[in-house]
Image (spheres, rainbow, N blue to C red):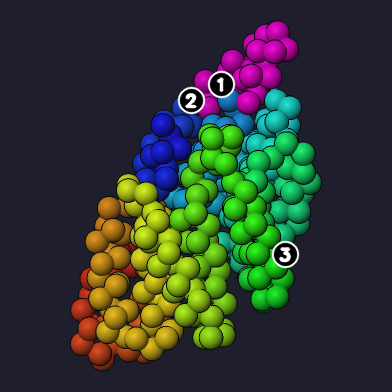
Amino acid sequence: MFREWDDQYGGGLRRKAVVGQLDEVNDLLDQHHPDAIRRRLRGIQAQLAETAATMSWDSGHQAIAQRYYVLAVKAAQAAGDPVFAANALAGMARQLLCLSRAGDALELIRLAQDHAAHGATPTVHAMLRTREAWAYANLGRPSAFHRAWDRAGEDMTSSTPDSDPHWIEYFDQAEFAGTIGGRLLEMAKHAPEFASEAAEQIERAITLRRPKRLRSSALDQLGLTEARMIEGEIDEACRLGEEALTTVEETTSDRVLVKVQEIYERTEQLANVSAVISLRDRMRPLVETTV
């Protein structure tokens, strides 16, 4: 339930509820229990800590998120679940990638891949390969990015959702396309020739997104807006931006607001274009909340 709230709306909702459940489990672990029950409790602790970490990160609480990710990794290891430990390490890596620490993130991703070497499903391997591709994109290594993307695609081809752990359920074809599209978009900011390919992947993500994935949909729509701007299609970008803001206004995600801020800054040099003026007027109240 908590994971669904986070997926749908962002980490700003119900984080306190997750932390409260985690505190209860922590209290139980202070008591004596048989080994089997203790391992079970540690597994629950790992999953709650990872969810709390993701929600904290999405709400802009970076240091708190890091502490919860570390707890999730340690708890998963104590529970004898190296694959979930890999998932938590991948979450830590994603946070570092968003903080422009791609080198550190790549080290964590490789550690996660070691943890997941035995027992992980193709979907989990695809998620880890996608994070690896993300790191290469941020490091300015397009050839390595494409190799990791290709391997992730091969894993997704072998994916069988019925055999996946429940916590990887979010990583479907839409998430795969959206994540890759976002990385291509990052490269397009320095090499505009990637913008068309970025738009293609993001459009695929938008088509495949399941209903109620509001945060992901908002990020997709904002990403497509930015791709069209890089391509020079300003009127189309503004039309897409207006649609995106309707979705943005339904979320409570700090990550989404950061993306709005990026687009607002990008449009500053076009502030005398009528369509851009309208878009910036609508973005301004959202941008002011991030200052």
Q: Secondary structure at mark 2?
A: helix
Q: Secondary structure at mark 1?
A: helix
Q: Residues within 10 Å of mark 1 (few under 14, many from 20)?
A: some
Q: Residues within 10 Å of mark 2 (few under 14, many from 20)?
A: some
Determine contact: label 2, label 1, CB under 8 Å: yes
- Residue sitting at 40 percent across and 67 percent down? 203
- Residue 33 against residue 254 in the figure, above or below: above
Amino acid carrying mark 3 in the image: Gly
- Residue sitting at 70 percent across and 25 percent down? 79
Q: Secondary structure at mark 3?
A: helix
Whole-Å distance between the Cαs marked 2 and 1? 6 Å
Q: Please tell me which residue lies in front, 177 or 253.
A: 177
Q: Which residue is mark 2?
A: 21
Q: Residues within 10 Å of mark 3 (few under 14, many from 20)?
A: some
- Residue sitting at 43 percent across and 34 percent down? 2
Pick the quarter of the image with the N terminus: top left
Q: Which residue is mark 3?
A: 103
- Residue 262 against residue 117 in the figure, above or below: below
The range drawn in magenta is: 22-43
Pick the quarter of the image with the C terminus: bottom left
Q: Is residue 175 left or right of residue 266?
A: right
- List x then y, in percent, for residue 93: 65, 54
Whole-Å distance between the Cαs marked 2 and 3? 34 Å
Whole-Å distance between the Cαs marked 3 and 1? 34 Å
Q: Is residue 167 left or right of residue 155?
A: left
- Residue sitting at 48 percent across and 80 percent down? 195
